[in-house]
Amino acid sequence: MSTTDDQVRGMISQRAADWFVANRAGMTPEQRQSFTDWLKTSPVHVQEYLAIAVIGRDLREACTVSARSIEALIERARNEEDSTVETLWPGNATTASIRYSRGWKFAAVALSVAMLVVSGLVIFRNFDVTSTASVPDVVTTLHYQTAHGTQQSYVLTDNSVVHLNTDSDVTIRYSPTQRTVSLNSGEAVFEVTHESARPFQVTAKSAQIIDLGTKFDVRLNEVATVVTVMEGRVEVRSSSAAEPRGNGLQLTPGQQVSVTDGGLPFAPVAVDAERATAWLHRQISFDREPLERVASEINRYASRSIEITTPELKGLRVSGIFTTDDTSAFVAFLRSLDGVQVEETATQILVFKRGDRKGIR
């Protein structure tokens, strides 16, 4: 398995152990429903839970062997009539030797069992709780990030999927009662497996996005957090002090909202969600967008930055579909525009009006 697969399997195993402890302590109806939802999500969840349950049962049975029983086994081994011995390393009278009897083989096994039981007690203590104990809030934390020009997808323990765009960074925290994600930079699409008793929440700057069973995109830019819904619904709230507590906007497919430090807008706007998330297919789609904005999007993936040195070209409206990993195709498109000239250096792609050399370095 890959490193990511190992991490996911480890998180599932940890979650199964948490549920095992919770079941022994006793769960509320809401927690029981959440547990049932978790089991139904994947056969792997069932396998891991059953494995933990078997370990717990075996350790409980092992721990019923009393110390007196072990001592009796050892005494029986000592009193065996067969005392034949073998010299493993023969030597002279001044050389230490080690002798081993078949009778003491039995005692060694008994001692090994005793050690196993002691170890079992230590391990089992992690699972053993009293009927009055509360459900533990064990938190599993993961951190994922992508480099410039790269994209990556991650499957979480609840079968939710996180797609990270270029230059993105997320921190994911899962507990038996909560699922929280912090988008620290960049952009991500979340495909969420809904769990009624364990909400999925994304925090990005001053925006809080609460999943209501959906697929949505969250992007951080210099001035705002942009949320676009592709499927289902989300509720978007602002943590800004200027926003009345409890206020929020519900978004449905094809709607988008930009959250700033000043709070939420009055209402979401209608957008083409497929175009807004074309990066999932390694594409960038524009319809009469200013060239400056298009160049800025290409720069999110390009190894050499595109710089428009003639101010009047920045507002030039262009349309097209470009791939995120093929800057040369975009450069060829620029060269095809009337009156536009492109000059490439080792670190930059300079775009200017034909015949205008001002500002060219």
Image (cartoon, rainbow, N blue to C red):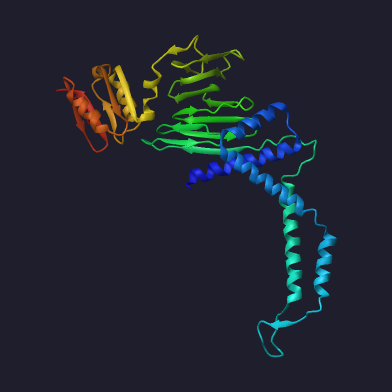
User: How many labels, in total?
Assistant: 0
**Quarter of the C terminus within the rendering:** top left
Along the viewing direction, whichever of 241 and 66 lies nearer the viewer: 66
Q: Position of residue 256 (x, y in %)?
A: 45, 16
Outermost residue on the left side: it is 355
- From this view, report whether residue 329 is shown above or below residue 67: above
* Quadrant in which residue 294 is drawn: top left
**Residue at x 29% of width, y 24% of height:** 321
**Residue at x 80% of width, y 35% of height:** 132
Along the viewing direction, whichever of 248 and 36 lies nearer the viewer: 36
**Residue at x 72% of width, y 46% of height:** 126
**Residue at x 40% of width, y 15% of height:** 271
Horizontal relation, residue 136 to residue 77: left or right: left
Outermost residue on the top side: it is 266
Q: Is residue 91 visible?
A: yes
Q: Position of residue 167 (x, y in %)?
A: 41, 34
Q: Is residue 263 visible?
A: no
Horizontal relation, residue 70 to residue 31: left or right: right
Q: Position of residue 198 (x, y in %)?
A: 62, 28
Q: Position of residue 14 (x, y in %)?
A: 62, 42
